[in-house]
Image (cartoon, rainbow, N blue to C red):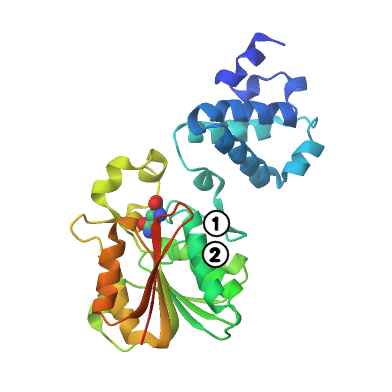
Amino acid sequence: MTNATDTAGTGDSLLHLPPDDRSVDRVRRLLRQRLTPVYGGNEAEAMTRLIFAALKGWSVTDMLIHANTILSDIFLSRLENILYRLDRHEPLQYILGQARFYGMDFTVNPSVLIPRPETEELVDIIVGNNRERKDLRVLDVGTGSGCIAIALARHLPFARVTAIDISPEALDVARENARRLKTGITFIQADILAIAKEGQPADSFDIIVSNPPYIARGEAADMDSNVLDYEPHTALFVPDDDPLRYYTPIADIARRTLSEGGQLYFEINPRYAEDIVAMLADKGFTDITVSEDISHRPRFVTAHQR
Ligand code: GLN
């Protein structure tokens, strides 16, 4: 082995690998070595799989089958570019332009939040409560990538889904996802705060769901740079003195537009669970329940229209 190869694992370019040392197996190992100091071993392995899946369409089995395949210069320089960006904590989903959610691949870019596993749990709760019901009218407020709206459109039989976002760039992404994932959704560009104030009669819905911005500015100090430096702040933050900034107007809209027995679902900041429950009770919602995410933090609130 040459000197250049010996140091590849400590940060040298993959392009310095001699041609006969560019096998899939070898490069996989080097990728893991490069990523482990920054992301830890498990995450490094998961990222390596995602990279090969996105760039080559390969599963883990495919990587084993191709263990001795020699990778091209072009492929290695693409990997180098990815590593460069990962070293700077850019989220892999933005680099690859895709994120997995509820068993589907969504297109993402920095104008939308990367779909989170907690939000899959929220979809699970809604689907679990409604899987037998047909023709539900669903509204998703602050749809972002469209992940909730699309997952519900795919899993609730004949649901008619409307999705709102204030950001035209986010709606472009959501529309693209709806098209690729073959779901018909009505997208509306609107500011939910303005809609709540106008008080005009709107459509009627059986389910309203939202994962609005809910992180207080003061919490930013504890956040990772991959979130803070890359994800859209308009999708993340609320003022410290107004943590329910979006929940209250969405609840008002829900009071006006939910059908009898209609359901309201929120993903929430665990810090404000009690405040959100109190606000919903105050507005007259019934059967208000808080459920925990897999990390046992109060993360979801469900309420019903009387
Ligand atoms: N759960 C996201 C996070 O912790 C925040 C999502 C949101 O603000 N709605 O980064």
Q: Is residue 71 left or right of residue 42?
A: right
Q: Are marks 1 and 2 in contact (CB under 8 Å)?
A: yes
Residue 306 quadrant: bottom left
Q: Is residue 135 above or below residue 14?
A: below
Depth order, front residue of 7/129: 129
Left or right: residue 90 versus residue 135 is left
The residue depicted at 66 percent of the width and 43 percent of the height is 55
The type of residue carrying mark 1 is Thr
Horizontal arrangement in the rendering, residue 297 relative to residue 24 (left or right): left
Q: Picture quarter containing residue 245? A: bottom left
Mark 2 C-beta to ligand 1 under 8 Å: no
Q: Residue at x 31, y 41 (%)?
A: 222
Q: Which residue does the numbered mark 2 point to in the structure image?
A: 176
Q: Label 2 neighbourhood size at 10 Å, few (<14), some (14-19), many (20+)? A: some
Residue 137: percent from left, percent from top:
49, 83
Residue 145 position within the rendered picture, expressed as x and y whole percent measured from the top left: 48, 61
Residue 162: x percent and y percent? 46, 77
* Frontmost residue, 89 versus 22: 89
Of labels 1 and 2, earlier in sequence is: 1
Asked if 301 appears above or below 111 in the picture, the reply is below
Q: Residue 209, which numbered label?
A: none
The three-letter code of the residue at mark 2 reads Glu
Is residue 183 visible in the rendered image? The answer is: no
**Residue at the image position 55 percent from the left and 53 percent from the top:** 99
Name the residue that disc number 1 marks.
107
Q: Quadrant of ligand 1?
A: bottom left
> From where the camera sits, is residue 18 visible?
yes
